[in-house]
């Protein structure tokens, strides 16, 4: 990160505070979202070369709602750790993005 990026890059966050939580509640929610991101990244790292939709990932994380899985996938993509690798039909007969581990996360 160069000096210009300090002012132009938005801060990275795991939890999107749409409910306006604050204090300890916000700290706990950020920690939980960060933990979810780490678990999902680990899931992809253990399956290098494979790709998954959010629904496919959610079958391995039954305690997380699909919205949290999608948030993690989008956050990991934004952070350059995953990338979208097309689409395929998923649950409810709808097309879903396919995510795959980025082997060289330094390049975006």
Image (spheres, rainbow, N blue to C red):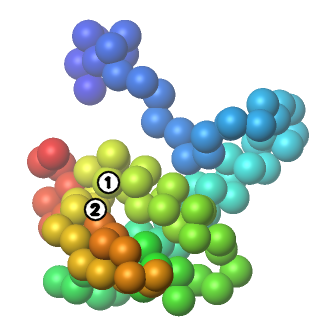
Determine which residue is flagged by label 2: 82
Cα gap from disc 2 to disc 1, whole angstroms: 5 Å
For the residue carrying disc 1, how many other residues have a C-alpha within 10 Å: few (<14), some (14-19), or many (20+)? some
Please provide percent x and percent y for residue 13.
53, 39
Assign a secondary structure to mark 2.
Answer: strand
Q: Please state, as top left, top right, bottom left or bottom right, where the C terminus lies in the image.
A: top left
Q: Residue at point 22% right, 85% down?
A: 50
Precedes in sequence: disc 2 or disc 1: 1
Please provide percent x and percent y for residue 47.
29, 87
Give whichever of 62, 88 is nearer the camera: 88
Determine which residue is flagged by label 1: 77
Looking at the rendering, which quadrant does residue 95 occupy? bottom left
* 91 up-or-down from 82: above or below: below
Give whichever of 25, 84 is nearer the camera: 84
Give whichever of 60, 98 is nearer the camera: 98
For the residue carrying disc 2, how many other residues have a C-alpha within 10 Å: few (<14), some (14-19), or many (20+)? many
Is the Cβ of the residue at disc 2 closer than 8 Å to that at disc 1? yes
Q: Residue at point 38% right, 82% down?
A: 93
């Amino acid at each position: 990160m160069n000096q210009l990026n300090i002012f132009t890059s938005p801060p990275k966050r795991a939890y999107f505070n749409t409910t306006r939580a604050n204090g300890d509640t916000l700290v706990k929610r950020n920690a939980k979202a960060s933990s979810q991101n780490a678990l999902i990244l680990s899931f992809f790292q253990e399956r290098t070369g494979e790709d998954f939709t959010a629904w496919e990932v959610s079958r391995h994380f039954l305690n997380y709602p699909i919205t949290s899985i999608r948030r993690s996938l989008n956050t990991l993509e934004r952070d350059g750790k995953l990338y979208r690798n097309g689409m395929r039909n998923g649950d409810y007969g709808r097309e879903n993005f396919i995510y795959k581990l980025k082997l060289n996360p330094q390049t975006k």
